[in-house]
Amino acid sequence: MHRTDNSHGHTATGHGHHARTVEAHREAVRALLAGSRGPGRTEELPLQAALGRGLAADIPAPVDLPPFANSQMDGFAIRSQDIPDDGTDLTVVAPIPAGATPAALEPGTAAPIMTGAMIPAGADAVVPVEKAVPDSFPEPGAAATVRVPATAAGTYVRHAGSDIRSGELALAAGTFLGPGQLGLLAALGITRVTVHRKLTVLLATTGDEVVEPGSPLEPGKIYDANGTLLEAAMRQAGLDVLRAAISTDSPDELTAMLREHAPQVDLIVTTGGVSKGAYEVVRQAAAGQDVEFLHVAMQPGGPQGIGRFDGVPFVGFPGNPVSCLVSFEMFLRPVLSSLFGAPAPRPAILARLAAPLESPEGKHQLRRGTLLPDGTVRLEGGAGSHLVHALANSNALIHVPLGTSALAAGAEVEVWTL
C-alpha cells in the first residue's frame, strides 16, 4: 500500500514554497500506480493485436538475423582467392535464386546470385553484375565465362547474425511496440508476444455548471470539454476508459458513483472539485478516504488530488480543460510510459522562443505553443487555463522551469511535441 498523505511532508494547505514540485508529484503518481503491475497484469497477444502496447518481458532472439549469409546485390558469387589483382575469367555455373539452397561453389567458377539468396559454401564475396564483363547474366543453359575484377572477401555479403545473433536481446521489457518492433519480432519468427494489459480508468467529470454537449445550454452553464479531452488523451495513451455521467455538485451522488465503479477499474481520475473553495465536490466525496489534496508548483494545474478511493488508485485533476490536459501530460502519461512501456514518451526537444514570455517564479509554467519548421516555437494564447481554442491550435507544450520569471525572444526552452 502506498501512503501518499505525507510521503513528501507537504500539507494540503501549502501554496508558495510548500507546494510540491512537479517531479515530486510525478514520483508520487508513479508510486501509486506501481502496485497496479501485480500478477495477472500481462496478456499474450498475436503481433498485430499488440500494436501500441508495452512489452512485459525481455525477448531474446531465437535465431540469427539474417539466418544465413546472403547476397546484398544481384551479381556473381565468387571465391575471392580465385582472382588475381588484375582480374580473371571464371566459368559461369547454375544461378542461385532467392530461397534456394545452393550447391557448394567449385574453384574457378562464378554463380549468378540474386539479392537475398544464400551464399554457397566456398564462396566469400559477390561481384555486382554491373562490375562484371559482360555486365549481364548469361542465357540459362548457355556455356559462358565472365570476367571479374579482384574482390575482397566479404564484399556485398550479409553475414549470418550481422543484424542480431541468436540469444542476444532483441527487445527489452518496457519497449513500446510500434511497426518497427513488431516487424523485428516477425523477422525472428515470433508470432505472439507478452504485453502489459490495458489499464481501465474511471473518468468522472464534475460540476453543477457543466452539461453534456448536445443538451440545451441554459444561462450560467457551459459544455463539458474535459470528458472528451481527457478520454481522447487516455484512449490515445492506450487506456480503456469508463466515462461516468457528469455528477451534480452533490458529494453523496459522486461518492455513490465512485463506489459503484471502483471495483471494476485500475484507476480513478476525476476533474474539478479539488481546490479549496466552498463547493469542492471531489474533496467532499473523498472525505474519510486515503486521499490527499495538495498544491503542485505548476501553472496551469496547481491543485491536485492523489491517493486511494476504496483501495483503488485515485488521481484528482483540476477542472479547467487546459489544466486537465497539462496534468495528464505531466503526471499520468509519463508514468504510464515508464511503468508499462506505453504510450511512447513525448519527444522533448529544445526550441527558441519566437516572442518573450513572463512566468510566475515559484511555479513550473506550461504554455501552449506551435513548433515551427525553423526550430522556433510560437506561443498560442495566454497563460489562462480555460483557453481551449489556443490548445486546439497548439502542437507543443513549452516548459518554463521553476525559478524563471521571464524569458526573452530567442531564448532556448524545452518543448514537448504533442
Image (tube, rainbow, N blue to C red):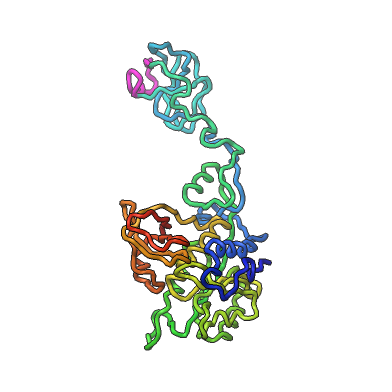
Q: Percent position (x, y) of residue 147?
A: 37, 15
Can you say which quadrant of the picture contains the C terminus?
bottom left
**Which residue sits at x=34%, y=60%?**
370
**Left-right relation of 230 to 311:** left
Compared to residue 415, the image places residue 154 above or below, namely above
Pick whichever, 91 or 310, lies toward us: 310
**Which residue sits at x=66%, y=68%?**
3
The reply to whether the magenta stretch includes residue 136 is yes
Q: Look at the image and give the residue range highlighted in magenta.
A: 130-148
Pick whichever, 416 or 15, lies toward us: 15
Q: Percent position (x, y) of residue 314?
A: 59, 71
**Left-right relation of 370 to 332:** left
Can you say which quadrant of the picture contains the N terminus?
bottom right
The reply to whether the magenta stretch includes residue 296 is no
Query: Can residue 94 be seen in this snapshot?
Result: no
**Which residue sits at x=37%, y=18%?**
142
